[in-house]
Image (cartoon, helix red, strand yellow):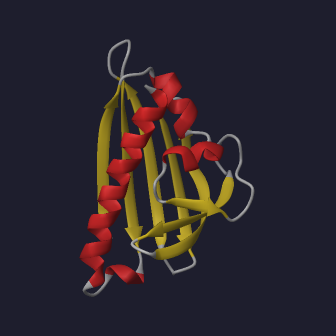
Amino acid sequence: MPEITTARTLQTSQEKAWAVISDPTRFAEWNTLHTSWGTQPPTDLAVGTTMTEVVTIKGVVDTIDFTTTDYDAPRFVQLEGSGSTASTVQLDFTVEPDGDTACVATLHVIFNASILFGPLGKIVQKAFGKQLDKSLEKLSEIVE
């Protein structure tokens, strides 16, 4: 299963970054893979919280049923899900303080999907990484 990790230093407090990352209703503001919600998203996360998100990568649309499997505010949240394309996804969002006025936001994704096998696989994996980088860039614009 491919894994992608990307991180970015944000010039804001851990708490301010966490407030955006941990609020699913704000995903559309910064998560470039987010297309829409399949169900009304929760306003906050806790272990056991479920949600259905529609994501798009390289024109492939996947509806993923996520469950929050780990939650340690204001530092870490893990979402695990299975998608309509027989995909499985684990998303880890980490926010660590970096001094008094900055933090480091990290997105770590482990995913598996039939689309990853064959010639399109490397293209989709590369595009996935680029979208995660763009997501952190948008996040920095919101919180800084």
Q: Is residue 56 left or right of residue 40?
A: left
> Looking at this view, is 6 or 32 the one in front?
32
Q: Is residue 58 left or right of residue 70?
A: left
> Looking at this view, is 36 or 66 the one in front?
36
Is residue 2 in sight in this rendering?
no
> Looking at this view, is 49 or 116 the one in front?
116
Q: Residue at horizontal 53%, vertical 54%? A: 79
Q: Is residue 98 left or right of residue 93?
A: left
Above or below residue 56? Residue 134 is: above
Q: Residue at horizontal 52%, vertical 23%? A: 15
Q: Position of residue 103 (x, y in %)?
A: 37, 25
Looking at the rendering, in which quadrant would you find the N terminus?
A: bottom left
Q: Residue at horizontal 54%, vertical 44%? A: 29
Q: Position of residue 26 (x, y in %)?
A: 60, 43
Q: Is residue 126 left or right of residue 113?
A: left
Is residue 12 in sight in this rendering?
yes
